[in-house]
Amino acid sequence: MSRLIKLVFLAASLFFVNNTFAQYDEEENEFRQYTSWGVSFGPNITNYNLKMDSGQDVPDRVSPSIGAEAGIQLDYHITELWGIELSTSANMEHIVLHKDDIEPHLLTFGLDIAVLATTWRTNPMSGLQLGIGPYSHFVIANIMTGTSAMANPYSRVVGINPRTNEPTFALGNFNAGLEIAAALNFDPQWAVRLEVKYGITDLLTTDIQRMYVRPLKVTLMANYKFNTRP
């Protein structure tokens, strides 16, 4: 009888140990939500999609030029394939204005903030990451170089606000739009990131239906990721 009891206890012990290890393996293999972050830097190229009437300080056309971008991305991994990314980047955007024989350069220094829904085509550590979502752009400072024959549109007064008695400038310091991003990961740390930002809001402060200025920016950056997966 005592031998039978010993065998029962031994069998129960073996079952308990085996079941415990099995649960441990399942928990280790189960996906857990986590966050990771990365930094990126590289050149950008900006252009303005515009329609303007002719005028003394209105360019005939604009052409894109190369600027620079540096940013931080914070990823919240909801599942192995889906997540949310919050990104912010400091940037210098460069535009060439064309008016008759003059070609002044307009440099703007700003900050972009974006919230993207993201997906990984393989896994978060390697492969292709895609994202889409809204962004906001804030102009902090601007410089116009090359000539004094055309006024800086960010400081050219086009009217006075009747409520605040403050001057209204030709271009505003804020715009928002849609961002599409793609990152090709070579390993868990390094990736090449491409961003396309299309402005939906009008940069013009004057509400004239036939006139608009909407920015378009393409950025190519090297991206280094710091993964904090437990």
Image (spheres, rainbow, N blue to C red):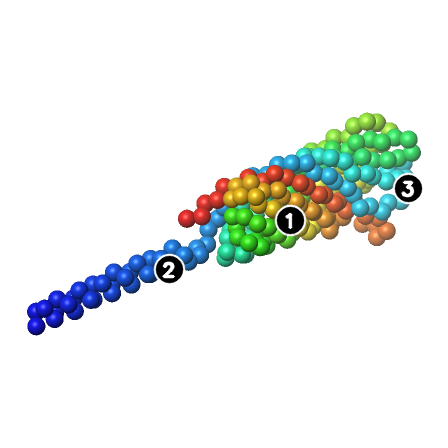
What's the distance in space between the residues labelled 1 and 3, CA to CA? Answer: 36 Å
User: Residue 202 placed where, x, y %?
Assistant: 76, 48
Residue behind mark 3:
54
User: Residue 17 placed where, x, y %?
Assistant: 25, 60
Residue behind mark 1:
181
Q: How many residues crowd mark 2 within 10 Å: few (<14), some (14–19), many (20+)?
A: few
Which one is nearer the viewer's eye here, 137 or 122? Answer: 122
Which one is nearer the viewer's eye here, 210 or 112? Answer: 112
Residue behind mark 2:
26
Q: Residue flagged by tag 1: what amino acid is it?
A: Ala
Look at discs 1 and 3 and give the one toward the viewer.
1
In the rendered image, the quadrant that contains the N terminus is bottom left
Secondary structure state at the residue bearing disc 3? loop
Instruction: Specify the quadrant of the image occupied by residue 52.
Output: top right
* Outermost residue, bottom side: 1
Secondary structure state at the residue bearing disc 2? helix
Left or right side of 39 for 23:
left
Tell me what residue is drawn at x 67 percent, y 40 percent: 220
What's the distance in space between the residues labelled 3 and 2, CA to CA? Answer: 69 Å
